[in-house]
Image (cartoon, grey):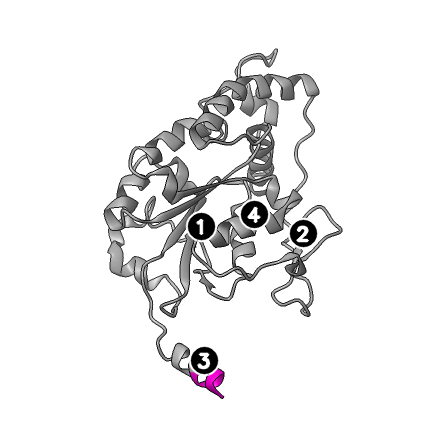
């Protein structure tokens, strides 16, 4: 009986408020999967679409931003996801101005694989797009990488991360190697629960394995929910020589990133 009373009391105290944590990036690195994993926890509340407040809609003010959030109980954690925040030079200061104690989650991914994934996404929406090689390289021999292409520049993670580390201590940022969302989802979610000060509730019973991506079960007895058809979108076929050129291009930036975050993603 008391549990029913508590549930009613909890529902009666739902309020909209600013988020407690933000998934700030990186685009095409696994941010959607990260949020879907977190939603397995009954104390996680999140808005539906990406809000883009700190990079596009800041002019509407904090009251507008608050209204985009779902109603939540005091013990709930509200989390927003907009991957483009990571590469926005203005977003770190804007977020700190709102809440200097904000918790941030950053998902990284092998920058070459991420680049292929972003190209595949762009190509699916823009028929007639130049080939991947034409976009990614400056010369016909494909020896010089086109770092002015935004998709290439996004993968220079350490350069973007420095903007955030100037304003937020590492203790407020959780770094995730996106590949672990597939290889070790239980460990990733446990780290997120701890980071967000949530009671541990997500276990291997919430994941169903068998395909390329884990499927999710809200409750151990529920039907698995698999991520949408955009997951696993076919990447362009690129020659190994060109992939190696891209890996060599990103390697020094990856090495600096590992030192900044105190861990290696083994790219």
Residue 75 placed where, x, y %? 39, 66
43 left or right, relative to 225: left
Residue 37 visible, this orientation: yes
Which of pointers 2 and 1 lies earlier in the amino acid sequence?
A: 1
Secondary element at tag 3:
helix
Up the image or down, 234 lies above or below 141; here it is below
The Cα–Cα distance between marks 2 and 1, rounded to whole angstroms, is 22 Å
Give the magenta-colored segment's residue range. 1-5
For label 1, the residue is: 195
For label 3, the residue is: 7
The quadrant the C terminus occupies is: top right
Mark 1 nearby-residue class (10 Å; few <14, some 14–19, many ≥20): some
The Cα–Cα distance between marks 3 and 1, rounded to whole angstroms, is 26 Å
Residue 170 placed where, x, y %? 38, 38
Secondary element at tag 1:
helix
Residue 32 visible, this orientation: no
Residue 192 placed where, x, y %? 49, 50
Residue 98 placed where, x, y %? 25, 50
The Cα–Cα distance between marks 2 and 4, rounded to whole angstroms, is 13 Å
Which of pointers 3 and 1 lies earlier in the amino acid sequence?
A: 3
Front in this rendered view, residue 181 or 132: 181
């Amino acid at each position: 009986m008391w549990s029913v009373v508590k549930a009613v009391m909890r529902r009666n105290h739902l309020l909209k408020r600013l988020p407690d944590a933000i998934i700030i990036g990186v685009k095409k690195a696994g941010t959607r999967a990260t949020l879907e994993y977190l939603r397995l926890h009954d104390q996680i509340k999140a808005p539906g679409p990406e809000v883009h407040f700190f990079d596009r809609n800041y002019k509407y003010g904090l009251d507008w931003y608050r209204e985009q959030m779902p109603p939540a109980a005091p013990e709930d954690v509200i989390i927003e996801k907009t991957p483009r925040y990571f590469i926005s030079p203005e977003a770190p200061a804007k977020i700190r101005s709102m809440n200097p104690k904000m918790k941030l989650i950053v998902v990284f991914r092998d920058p070459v694989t991420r680049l292929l994934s972003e190209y595949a996404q762009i190509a699916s929406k823009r028929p007639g797009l130049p080939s991947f090689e034409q976009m990614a390289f400056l010369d016909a021999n494909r020896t010089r990488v086109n770092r002015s292409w935004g998709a290439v520049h996004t993968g220079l993670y350490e350069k973007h991360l420095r903007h955030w580390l100037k304003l937020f201590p590492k203790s407020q940022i959780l770094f995730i190697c996106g590949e672990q969302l597939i290889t070790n989802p239980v460990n990733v979610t446990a780290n997120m629960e701890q980071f967000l000060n949530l009671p541990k509730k997500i276990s291997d019973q919430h994941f169903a394995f068998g395909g390329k991506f884990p499927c999710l079960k809200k409750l151990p007895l529920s039907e698995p929910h698999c991520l949408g058809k955009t997951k696993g979108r076919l990447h362009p076929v690129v020659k190994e020589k060109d992939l190696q050129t891209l890996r060599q291009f990103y390697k020094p930036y990856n090495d600096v990133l590992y030192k900044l975050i105190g861990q290696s993603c083994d790219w």
